[in-house]
Image (spheres, rainbow, N blue to C red):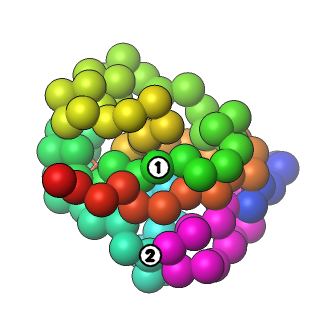
Amino acid sequence: MCKATVTFADVGKSVRVPEGTRLIDVSDDVETGIVYGCRQCSCGRCMVEVVEGEDGLAPPTVLEIEVLDHHEGGARSRLACQAKVVGDVTLRPRPRT
Ligand code: FES
């Protein structure tokens, strides 16, 4: 299985993960600042900003798009509890207003 590098810019750490890994499955070990609530694509608390490598995440599902829209996620926003890694990507927690 191919691997990809996920870089968490807020803590300056990178990890190699198998493609298909969800961000939620690696972020806790990295001790990044991503905060989770529902962990089920509802609350929007786990929003992250893709700094580099948008193609490194699988396209969002319809539900993820709906939640991002509801919580005013920008074009580079994703939900860490949903997004699957498919290539190299750099991200950071998105500050909530
Ligand atoms: S933790 Fe609630 S949407 Fe991701």
* Residue 88 shows in the view: yes
Dot 1 corresponds to which residue? 49
Question: In the image, which disc is placed on residue 90?
Answer: none
The amino acid at mark 2 is Thr
The amino acid at mark 1 is Glu
Element type at mark 2: loop
Tell how many labels. 2
Q: Earlier in the sequence, mark 2 or mark 1?
A: 2
Q: In this view, does 11 lie above or below 9?
A: below
Judged left or right of residue 59, residue 25 is: left
Question: In the image, which disc is placed on residue 32?
Answer: 2
Element type at mark 1: strand
Residue depicted at 38% across the width and 34% down the height: 74
Closest to the observer, 45 or 40: 45
Q: Quadrant location of residue 5?
A: bottom right
x and y, in percent, of residue 39 in the image: 26, 52
* Residue 81 shows in the view: no
x and y, in percent, of residue 63 in the image: 30, 23
Residue depicted at 26% across the width and 25% down the height: 69
Judged left or right of residue 97, residue 66 is: right
Q: Which segment is the magenta one?
A: 6-19
Given the current orientation, which residue lies at the most extreme front position? 97
Q: Quadrant location of residue 6?
A: bottom right
Q: In this view, does 40 lie above or below 3?
A: above
x and y, in percent, of residue 59 in the image: 55, 26
Residue depicted at 82% across the width and 50% down the height: 1
Q: 10 Å neighbourhood of mark 1: few (<14), some, or many (≥20)?
A: many
Comparing marks 2 and 1, which lies closer to the viewer? 1
User: Is 17 inside the magenta-drawn segment?
Assistant: yes
